Amino acid sequence: MPIRKVLVVDDSPTDLANIKGILGEAGCVIVTATNGQDAIEKAMEEKPDLIFMDIIMPDMDGYAACRSLGNQAETKNIPVIFVTSKSQKADRLWAQMQGGKGFITKPYVADAITDQLKAFL
């Protein structure tokens, strides 16, 4: 199934705008959230095909949000791609253990985002 609706979660307005621009050019419908709790609510409401999520955010981080999404029947099959400044091997492993399906390190190039998008087409 082609990716049509994408949820982008980041507390940085700049990163949110950058990813929205990249996905918009790829023809996606974009929904945004600025923290983990907001991401869970938007995912339940909007049923996106894919989620790009930051890890370090206020209130609820991306790891906790990903775990929560994975534990709910309505959202457990939505792939989560982490987009983060965390770049250690342990961060990648932990992201995978939390249910993440992909990992992009900031700063990123547009191709990193579109490659992940294509991987889930």
Image: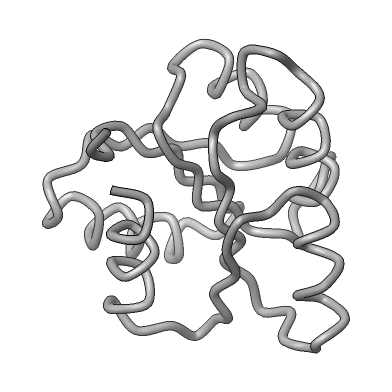
- Which of the two residues, 98 or 1, is positioned nearer the viewer here? 1
Q: Position of residue 76 (x, y in %)?
A: 66, 27
Q: Position of residue 41 (x, y in %)?
A: 63, 18
* Relative side of 1 to 9, left or right: left
Quadrant, the N terminus? top left
Please tell me whether residue 36 is drawn above or below residue 111 in the rendered image.
Answer: above
Task: Note whether 17 is above or below 37 in the view shown.
Answer: below
Please name the residue shown 43% across and 16% down the image: 46
Quadrant assignment, res 43: top right
- How many numbered circles are shown? 0
Residue under the image location 28 percent in, 66 percent down = 114
- Which residue is located at x 55 percent, y 56 percent? 81
* Quadrant hosting residue 85: bottom right
Quarter location, residue 14: bottom left
**Residue 9: x, y in percent?**
55, 46
Left or right of 37 on screen, residue 108: left
Q: Is residue 17 above or below residue 73?
A: below
Front-most of 19 and 47? 47
Q: Residue at x 54, y 43 (%)?
A: 79
The type of colouring in the image is one colour
- Relative placement, left or right, of 103 versus 21 is right
